[in-house]
């Protein structure tokens, strides 16, 4: 039965992906979050991360969400996004892919294995086309694992039930991320920079020279031709209309 | 360093991992550590507008048209009008004690406040209204994030933990690993 459901889900996905266009993070109507969040509202439902479960709320009555489903996961859920009708979760130990073709009852399509050195990270994920980009940040290691590293990982999602890691790029202390066209922006708090990657070939990224100096960048939202980057105590606006050149156009600081 | 949640687990949640970490059993501990700062149970009901506040520590960000929302963990949400990038205006601060995260759908804002799920009407941004509180649906972390060491155990009779501060511990029992 489980296999049948997976098969059905797979067909539904094939159907969905063939008739939808790339549209970035999908959220309700006019709203858009950064890459680091534990709540997402999508088509009349809200998904909320608890320590070790995904809660699904019906927003049929938006004034009083109704808990309709709980999906058990491992401990360590941190971030959730929806992209083209699929939910992606970043956890301290894995990237999860959830089927929400029946929105009230999400199902786990895949849970990636991750090398031990990357366990305990803070792990936002964004998806573009068939590829997921996820940052793994090790701040303080469990078990005194001094050798642990932080990195940007790239997954091939052609088969959503079996994501394959196709790239790994070491970074200092990466946080949130996002993209416009073929430029991926990664907040690197350790380097005090927003780092730019050319993702036109997702299996072989090139780091661009145009890194943006910014103290403690945390997360970002691409809003048309501008980008809002949050830092520890403020946020900055950049003009993206002449990529890969990026120009700072505004700022709020503490 | 950013207080990003989780990865460290209270001892009683972490039995599974103990062996792998060669953790010794903790006894009473005196010395430097962390202690929780609480919002009293009565204070958790203070969901209201305040004048714009200083950003102490940014969190989740959300853009809705020209309105930009930025979480201030434990305290509430800053709201800005960002229509003109060169002239951004702070509009208001939504005080939501013990808030952990939020999202927005239409003119409803959903947020967790310690163990509760709140639904807040933001159709009038300057006069927000709590519509619904569902108690006890979330299990917040009962330990300091990104911290390795002893801390004063959480006592929920004192309220909700809004942040952790450095302190000199006496007879501390709880520790992360």
Image (spheres, coloured by chain):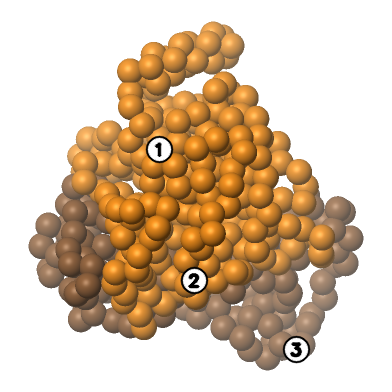
Q: Earlier in the sequence, mark 1 or mark 2?
A: 1
The residue tagged with tag 2: helix, strand or loop? Answer: strand
Q: Chain of mark 1?
A: A
Q: Bin the neighbour count of mark 3 within 10 Å (Cα to Cα): few under 14, some 14-19, many 20 and up.
A: few
User: Which of the labelled discs sits on residue B31, or is there none?
Assistant: 3
Q: Which residue is mark 1?
A: A82
Position of A25 with respect to A116 (left or right) is left
Residue A120 can be seen in this image: no
Who's brown, chain-wise?
Answer: B
User: Which of the labelled discs sits on residue A213, or is there none?
Assistant: 2
Q: What residue appears at the point 36 percent right and 39 percent down from the top-left corner? A: A24
Are callouts 3 and 1 both on one chain? Answer: no
Q: Position of residue B175 (x, y in %)?
A: 72, 71
Q: Chain of mark 2?
A: A
Q: Bin the neighbour count of mark 1 within 10 Å (Cα to Cα): few under 14, some 14-19, many 20 and up.
A: many
Q: Is residue B108 above or below residue A157?
A: below
Q: What residue appears at the point 27 percent right and 34 percent down from the top-left corner? A: A43
**On-image quarter of the C terminus of chain B:** bottom right
Q: Write down the colour of chain A.
A: orange
Mark 3 or 2, which is nearer the eye? 2
């Amino acid at each position: 039965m489980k296999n049948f459901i997976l098969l059905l889900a797979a067909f539904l996905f094939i159907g969905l992906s063939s008739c939808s266009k790339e549209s970035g993070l999908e959220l309700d109507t006019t709203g858009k979050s950064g890459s680091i969040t534990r709540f997402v509202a999508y088509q009349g439902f809200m998904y909320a991360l608890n320590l070790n479960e995904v809660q699904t709320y019906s927003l049929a009555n938006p004034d009083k969400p109704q808990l309709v489903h709980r999906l058990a996961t491992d401990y360590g859920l941190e971030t959730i996004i929806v992209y083209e009708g699929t939910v992606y979760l970043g956890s301290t130990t894995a990237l999860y892919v959830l089927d929400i073709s029946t929105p009230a009852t999400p199902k786990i399509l895949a849970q990636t294995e991750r090398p031990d050195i990357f366990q305990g990270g803070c792990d936002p994920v964004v998806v573009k086309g068939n590829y997921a980009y996820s940052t793994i940040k090790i701040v303080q290691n469990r078990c005194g694992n001094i050798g642990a590293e932080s990195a940007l990982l790239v997954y091939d999602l052609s088969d959503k039930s079996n994501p394959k890691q196709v790239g790994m790029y070491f970074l200092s202390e990466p946080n949130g991320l996002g993209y416009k066209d073929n430029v991926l922006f990664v907040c690197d708090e350790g380097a005090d920079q927003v780092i730019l990657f050319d993702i036109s070939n997702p299996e072989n990224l090139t780091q661009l020279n145009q890194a943006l100096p910014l103290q403690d960048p945390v997360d970002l939202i691409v809003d048309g031709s501008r980008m809002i980057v949050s830092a520890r105590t403020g946020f900055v606006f950049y003009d993206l209309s002449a990529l890969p050149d990026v120009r700072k156009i505004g700022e709020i600081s503490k | 360093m950013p207080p990003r949640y989780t990865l460290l687990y209270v001892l009683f949640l972490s039995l599974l991992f103990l062996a792998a970490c060669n953790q010794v059993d903790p006894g009473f501990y005196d010395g430097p550590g962390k202690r929780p700062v609480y919002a009293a149970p009565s204070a958790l009901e203070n969901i209201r507008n305040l004048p714009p506040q200083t950003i102490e520590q940014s969190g989740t960000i959300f853009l809705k048209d020209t309105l930009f929302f930025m979480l201030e963990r434990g305290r509430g949400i800053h709201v800005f009008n960002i229509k003109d990038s060169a002239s951004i205006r702070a509009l208001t601060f939504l005080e939501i004690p013990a808030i952990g995260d939020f999202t927005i759908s239409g003119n409803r804002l959903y947020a967790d406040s310690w163990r509760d799920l709140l639904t807040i009407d933001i159709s009038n941004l300057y006069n927000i209204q709590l519509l619904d509180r569902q108690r006890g649906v979330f299990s917040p972390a009962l330990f300091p994030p990104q911290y390795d060491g002893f801390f004063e155990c959480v006592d929920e009779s004192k309220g909700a933990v809004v942040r952790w501060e450095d302190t000199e511990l006496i007879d501390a029992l709880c520790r992360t690993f």
